[in-house]
Every structure is written in structure tokens, then in C-alpha cells.
Amino acid sequence: MSKAEEHRKYIRQEAVKNDKSQSKFSNESSIVKPEKEAIQQANKEKINLDKIVYCPFCLHRAKLIKFLVSDKKGGISTYRARCPECRTGMLMKTVSAMHYMTDKKIESYAQWVCDYRMGFWKKCKKDIWDKRLKEYGWIGIFWKKYKAIKASMPREHGSEEVYYDNDYEKDREERRKQQGENYD
């Protein structure tokens, strides 16, 4: 076998090792598909993968299993998650907390948005986020709590939050004038 053939064989072997869709043998000598491996690992970690959760950045609604990412060892990360729609990374505890959204949870989500220091409005897909916030019926509860929190916080001029608040208020006023309705 020539060096070129050996190299091609090595490349194929490495590609097979790195292929995430390959089946693997479990400790019980049975073939396990990657999805089943994720479920097995989740059962060990006591994670409910069938729980419906929301992405905090685009409010995409899906089962938790769709948010899973693999770690460097080829397993499933129990620390990190990624939205399947907007592809934004987040902590698993953040996305896990975004399920069965009651009024109290929506208020705590508004608190989380205010406290988020990593540029929430830059990561957030504003047009999709606004549409889904209204679609889910959270818009009134969220903005009431958000404004109350922001009113109690000292304003930082030039910050992205101030910009988005003003931008949102302008859009809201325009919609009020167009529709002739008074929302609160």
C-alpha cells in the first residue's frame, strides 16, 4: 500500500470516528443510535427531555431534546444548550427554567432580561421575539414588569436597553395611532 492510499484510509477512519450519526456499541454489547444515547445520558442525569421549553432569545418553543449540544467527548452537554432556530447558545439551566410559563414566570423572565449583562437586545431576534411575545399573550405582563424594573434602575445613557425601550415605545405609539386603540 502506498503512502497516499494509507493516508486516504486514515482520513476515512478519522471521519468515521468523528461522524456523530454513527451508531455505537453500548456496554451491554448492543447497538445504540445517537438519539437513544442522549436519552440514556439524560436518564442518568435526571433531565426530562420531553419537557416543552422556550428559547429566551427568540421564544422558539420546542422539546428540550432539540436544544441539546454535544460536548467535546462526544456525549451530550448537561451544562450548555443551543436554540435550534436562532442558534444562540445559552446555559442549560436557563432554557430549562423557560417551561410552563405562568404570570409569575413571565415576570421573572422580564427580571432576567433586565439583569442580563451579555447584550440581550443584541442576541435577541427582535422582530421574531416581539411577534411571539404577542402570539403567546405575554406582551402585557412582560412589558408592565419590564418597565417597572427599568424605572427603578438608574438609567445608563447610550446603553442598548435605553435604545430598545425608546424604539419599542415609538413603534407602539405608531401602532396606537394607526389602529385608533389604546393599549396598556
Image (cartoon, rainbow, N blue to C red):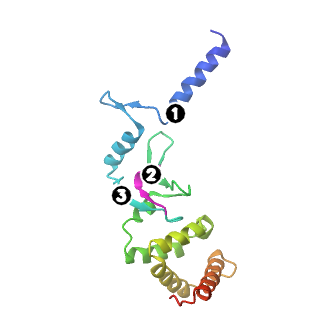
Tell me the quarter of the image containing the N terminus.
top right
Rendered image quadrant of residue 170: bottom right
CA gap between label 2 and label 1 equals 19 Å
Amino acid identity at mark 2: Lys
Amino acid identity at mark 3: Lys
Mark 2 or mark 1, whichever is nearer to me = 2
Q: Relative to residue 23, is residue 48 depicted above or below? A: below
Task: Give left or right: position of 106 versus 181.
Answer: left
Q: Residue furthest left?
A: 28
Residue 66 — which label? 2
Please state the horizontal and vertical placement of residue 28, each as a whole percent of the image: 29, 30
Please state the horizontal and vertical placement of residue 44, each as a whole percent of the image: 32, 46
Q: Secondary structure at mark 1?
A: loop
Residue 51 — which label? 3
Sequence-earlier tag: 2 or 1? 1
* 90 in the magenta segment: no
Q: Residue furthest right?
A: 158
Q: Residue furthest top?
A: 1
Q: Secondary structure at mark 2?
A: helix
Please state the horizontal and vertical placement of residue 147, each as a whole percent of the image: 53, 84
Task: Give left or right: position of 126 versus 36.
Answer: right
Count neighbours of disc 2 (C-alpha within 10 A) and say few if under 14, some if 14 to 19, many if 20 or more.
some
Depth order, front residue of 26/171: 171
Count neighbours of disc 3 (C-alpha within 10 A) and say few if under 14, some if 14 to 19, many if 20 or more.
some
The residue stretch that appears in magenta:
60-68
Looking at the image, can residue 103 be seen?
yes
Rendered image quadrant of residue 121: bottom right
Count neighbours of disc 1 (C-alpha within 10 A) and say few if under 14, some if 14 to 19, many if 20 or more.
few
Location of mark 1 (residue)? 19
Tell me the residue at 48%/76% (across/down).
110
